[in-house]
Image (cartoon, grey):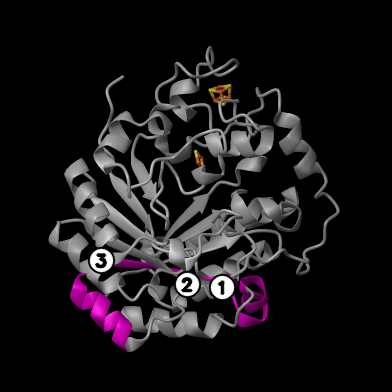
Amino acid sequence: MPVNLPYALTAELTHRCPLSCPYCSNPLELQKRENELSTDQWLSVLEQADELGVAQVHFTGGEPLLRPDLERLVRRARELGLYVNLITSGVGLSDQRLRQLTEAGVDSIQLSVQAASSELADPIAGFPAHELKRQAARRIRDIGLPLHMNVVLHRANLHQLEDIIELCVSWGAERLELANAQYYGWALRNVQQLLPRREQLQEAEAAYARAQRRYGRQIELLWILPDYFEDFPKPCMGGWGQVSLTVAPDGRVLPCTAASEIRTLTFENVRERGLVWVWRDSPSFNAYRGSDWMPEPCRSCERRELDYGGCRCQAFLLTGDARATDPVCIRSPHRGIVSDRVGTMAGADTGLPDYSYRGR
Ligand code: SF4
Ligand code: FES
């Protein structure tokens, strides 16, 4: 089949992070600093991404501000004509760092928040970050950059949804992603602590609709569906190897940030292979392109071009087979895994659960 050009590169500069959010999508096996790509290797990745046709790069982690070469990478990406987005916890975003990043040409910054106040946000993050985020938001607005924010929603903070939206409006956010937790990496380790009750979600969705009416165009609100509660899976990544690629801190090239957990595939490394070859020809990127790889029920399903059989990472993590129909799908023979999990949440309370925190 013809291979599309990728639109976006996610550059995971490091897995190191001052925070330890229990819903982190980083893999359980976090890469250590000594395994991270060097500055020159990242510069080469950016040049190869440009050659491949990539239009935007998301610098993320872990916490990308922990890399002292971030400004150099941002500058090179802009020289190449790429749109540069920085995804950060805001911890470490001093006036000086922000000035340097702005001079280097960063186009937008996405700042995460954990809850509506530090009393809940800091225990969720496992770090006193909330006040630092407030200061980071003010700096971003003062320097004239668009402020985009995101919050991961789960059992312990869904009841605050309206207050979280109000907080982000008061901090000057132009856009807020309300991202219901997705269960990969550390989030899957903490799934029993994070999964909400169905009624909680219904109340939050109503709060989201009220906020949309209240704020109108003042802030763009995006509701990312809680897929365990849906009947059909999300069209994950717009299809495997279709629109974007991720380079992990150690240089492995992945079709999505969670893919390193698929143990049945071998992922190429930019230390040994060019990005163009990996995108076009590598067995890992070609493994689930198109629909020939699909087993039943996806193979003969009328939705297969709409959702591509769902998420390969979720299929592997829940069934051990990355080719399987995503268990979120009501037509999947493994749907019971998801329904059972959702069912056990019926009587769960909303206090702060006992999380397994990732190491830093
Ligand atoms: Fe999508 Fe496969 Fe379910 Fe059909 S059977 S809706 S293609 S996941
Ligand atoms: Fe990897 Fe869905 S997160 S394919």
Q: Is residue 227 above or below residue 44?
A: above
Amino acid, disc 1: Leu
Question: Neighbour class for label 2 at 10 Å: few (<14), some, many (≥20)?
Answer: many
Looking at the picture, tell me which residue is in the foreground, 194 or 138: 194
Label 3, secondary structure: give it: helix
Determine which residue is flagged by label 2: 89
Q: Residues within 10 Å of mark 3 (few under 14, many from 20)?
A: many
Mark 1–mark 3 CB contact (< 8 Å): no
Query: In this rendering, is residue 337 above or below 180?
Result: above
Q: Nearer the viewer, mark 1 or mark 2?
A: 1
Q: Secondary structure at mark 2?
A: loop
Instruction: Find residue 312 and report its horizontal and vertical position in percent.
Output: 53, 34
Viewer-nearest of discs 1 and 3: 3
Kindly indicate whether the residue at mark 2 contacts the one at mark 3 (C-beta within 8 angstroms). no
Disc 1: which residue = 19
Which numbered dot is residue 73? 3
Which residues lie in the magenta part? Answer: 96-125
Q: In which quadrant is the N terminus drawn?
A: top left
**Residue type, mark 3 in image:** Leu
> Left or right of 1: which side holds 321?
right
Image spot of residue 113 (x, y percent):
52, 71
Quadrant in the rendering for residue 341? top right
Residue drawn 47% across and 36% down? Answer: 266
Give whichever of discs 1 and 2 has the lower sequence position: 1
Q: Which mark is residue 11?
A: none
The question of residue 27 being in magenta is answered with no
Q: Residues within 10 Å of mark 1 (few under 14, many from 20)?
A: many
Looking at the image, tell me whether mark 3 or mark 2 is earlier in sequence order.
Answer: 3
Q: Is mark 3 within 8 Å of ligand 2?
A: no
Question: Marks 1 and 2: CB-CB under 8 Å?
Answer: yes
Q: In terms of image quadrants, where is residue 187?
A: bottom right
Q: Nearer the viewer, mark 3 or mark 2?
A: 3
